[in-house]
Image: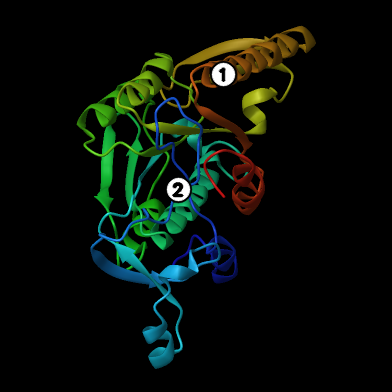
Amino acid sequence: MNSLLDPEFMEKLDGLALLGRRRRGGRIGEHQAWRRGTSLEFEDYRDYQSGDDIRYLDWNVWSRLGRLVVKRFAAEEDMTVHLLVDASKSMSFGTPSKLHLAVRTAASLGYIAWRRMDKVALAAFTGDLRETVAPARRRGGPTEIFSVLSGLQAEGRTRFSESLIRYAMRSTRPGLAVIFSDLFDPEGYKKGLDALRYRRFDILLIHVLCAEDLVPGGRGAMQLLDAETGEGRKIRMDRSLAERYRGVARDFVDEAETYCRRQGIEYIRAGSEVPFQDLVLAYLRGGAFLR
């Protein structure tokens, strides 16, 4: 079906759901399957999943086809999941690369959203915002999402805030925005996150870093090159400078996490060396937006 997720792992995702905050200022609650009531208009079927209300099982379909399905109603509260992937050049670093982790985690969440019949949108940003997949409920499967993610290459400069501001301002269906980025933008990242908050998005920021981002390698005379601008600087890396580097890196990460916590943004830091399966099934399931 795709080159990003193997069938065995996809089976583990089948019972999961992405969640959203339905009332501003309220607690983050489970993404409900549907609203209760007797005047709801029937719209469609979907496969039964663990946790669904058995009152909505269609026993006629079971008797004819031996298949458990539940009724979906037009008044069902759906959710739009926005997958926003930083595909700038700095995301090429790491073994495997930061983009590798971002792409496969995004594919996993896109698959979960599709299984729950949520609308899914996908955009990548480098020097410019590329809205590659518009929000839609894809009855035929997440093939388009997988195809676009598979083709992403790490290239160009980061314009994190500029891209997210543009995305927030033109989005007509705010929902859950899942952002994958190393946040390496000289112009900063806070204005972009603030724009999404202003438009009433729920935000999950997955801060993707690699070992080289946090601990400098090598000693002695060397030239540092900015991966995105090509600008260079000659330095002599000794123990003192390496310690200063680590301190600046720690401060950068701590500041991002503190800012997100204060603004009600779910923050998860992920090393590119972490298997994306573990990130989804262990770390993300321990947060507010995936159950």
Q: Earlier in the sequence, mark 2 or mark 1?
A: 2
Q: Residues within 10 Å of mark 2 (few under 14, many from 20)?
A: some
Assign a secondary structure to mark 2: loop
Q: Which mark is residue 31?
A: 2
Assign a secondary structure to mark 1: strand
Task: Answer whether residue 91 is visible to the viewer in this image.
Answer: yes
Q: Quadrant of the N terminus?
A: bottom left
Q: Please state which amino acid type lies under the numbered disc 1.
A: Leu
Residue beneath disc 1 = 224
Which residue is at the front of the view, 63 or 178?
A: 63
From the viewer's perspective, is residue 205 above or below residue 144? above
- The residue shown at (56%, 42%) is 97
Q: Position of residue 219 (x, y in %)?
A: 74, 19
Q: Position of residue 95 (x, y in %)?
A: 63, 43
Which residue is at the front of the view, 25 or 181?
A: 25
Left or right side of 206 for 190: left
